[in-house]
Amino acid sequence: MPQRVKKDLLKSPRGTRDLFGDELSRFDFIRSRFGEIASYYGFQKIQTPHIEHSDLFTASLGEATDIVEKQMYTFRTRGGDQLTLRPEGTIPAVRAYFENGMQAWPQPVMLYYSGSYFRHESPQRGRFREFGQVGLEVLGDSDAIADATVIRVADLAIKEMGISAQLELNTLGDKECRPGYRKELSNYYRKHFNYLCKDCKRRFKENPLRLLDCKENSCLELKKNAPQMLEYVCKECKDHFKAVLDFMDSLEIPYLLNPYLVRGLDYYTRTVFEFVATLGGKEGQAENAAEKVERLEVGGGGRYDYLAEILAGKSLPAAGCALGVDRLSEVLREGGVVPPTEEAKVFLIQLGDVAKRKSLALVEEFRKAGLRLAQSLAKDSIRGQLRVADKLGVEYSIILGQKEAMDGTVILRDMSSGIQETLPLPKLIERLKNKIYPK
Ligand code: AMP
């Protein structure tokens, strides 16, 4: 007797899901739009492994980041290596740059990627444990044009997906000026320590900048009067930031200055940015429409001039960004956007043994001619097959019966008028090509 399968065995792990149908079409659409634009702007695609040495991330992200503290999927292999499922794409790209001798290439090296990333987070709307990202990195350029290129390409890609998202920008300064700001921030929060949430009390000691990222109400209140980085940045950082903003103006990319934008990762310097979309809150949909509006961060990035120093002891100024594919897909879904797919406009109906045997060869004739053909070869009755054709909404059916299979003809049926005619196969293909894709 076969054992009954335990119910949980048939469930994917929490925070992961199967992608198919419309959702997968949206994923493919997002990835291909992004890839097209990134490669046009000179970014080369890179694919790095899903696993990396754990130390790569712990060394570069900083022990006190959420990712290292609690989100990494880390395991020891049979060979004794300590590996981690990649939680993000920038660090592997920088590792790949040095490992593959890209220092010797003309600089900057511009890379883009697309894939799955893994973080042990609490799943909720738009937050998964395995999620898709597409990302860009400009490696080896300290000029503001690198920051601007990354933002430009990300902004274009988002827009061309049919999504509107607000760009928010800030600067975090550098080694020279950030310590002064950090100190001011510590002084401010020390005075209000008792009002901080539990997590922030702990974060306060590790990195006070991360307090600005907290979503707890009491911490949000405190943030309103916290000191702002822009008042503490050195001249070089201020000039760099101004140059980035000038690029935004000349590219006509609207932005919002968000003085409290810090982002979760320690390796950022100078420019940081996020793209924020809004979900829900359509007029008249809810009584408290304003309360139903949800901010959804669909992407973010910035400059990370010191990351390579930590990883490789080498100087490599760089900027990059990553967009969340699941979240972009969610925005598209909510907006009712169905990505264009090449759906079949012709359906093949076969009747009888001889026709069935010939039908696979017929499918191949259509494929060679570049015409999409749907079929349901497992079905035998004409009614059953016509029902599928109706469901698919095809414009034409072709019917291959016993007689047609013998004399090399087929019946072409116009599905809306019901008119049928018998044609030799080559003529039929020619006819459909002209009707479906007229020149
Ligand atoms: P980050 O790598 O944290 O800078 O995130 C870049 C983008 O990836 C974010 O703006 C999100 O859109 C997306 N993202 C990050 N974490 C997740 C997650 N757990 N689930 C879905 N999307 C995510």
Image: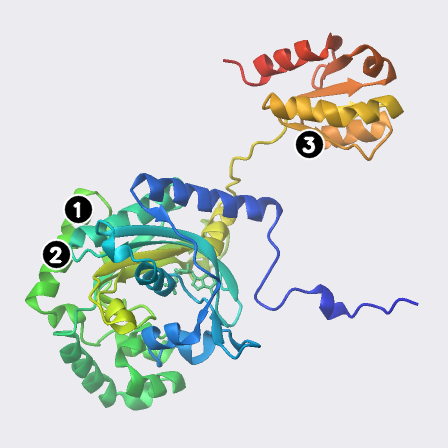
The residue depicted at 22 percent of the width and 84 percent of the height is 186
- Indicate whether 136 appears above or below 345: below
The residue depicted at 24 percent of the width and 89 percent of the height is 190
- Tell me which amino acid carries mark 3: Leu
- Indicate whether 435 appears above or below 160: above
- Tell me which amino acid carries mark 1: Asp
Query: Could you tell me which secondary element the residue under label 1 belongs to?
Result: helix
Give how far across and how far down residue 436 sits, in percent: 58, 18
Closer to the chain start, of discs 1 and 3, is: 1
- Indicate whether 293 appears above or below 399: below
Crowd around label 1: few <14 · some 14–19 · many ≥20 (10 Å)? few
Query: Could you tell me which secondary element the residue under label 3 belongs to?
Result: helix
| Left-right relation of 91 to 6 | left
Residue 308 occupies which quadrant of the picture? bottom left
The residue identified by callout 3 is: 392
- Tell me which amino acid carries mark 2: Lys
| Left-right relation of 334 to 432 | left
The residue depicted at 20 percent of the width and 84 percent of the height is 188
The residue identified by callout 2 is: 242
Give how far across and how far down residue 104 sits, in percent: 24, 54
The residue identified by callout 1 is: 249
Where's the N terminus, which quadrant?
Answer: bottom right
Closer to the chain start, of discs 3 and 2, is: 2
| Left-right relation of 86 to 98 | right
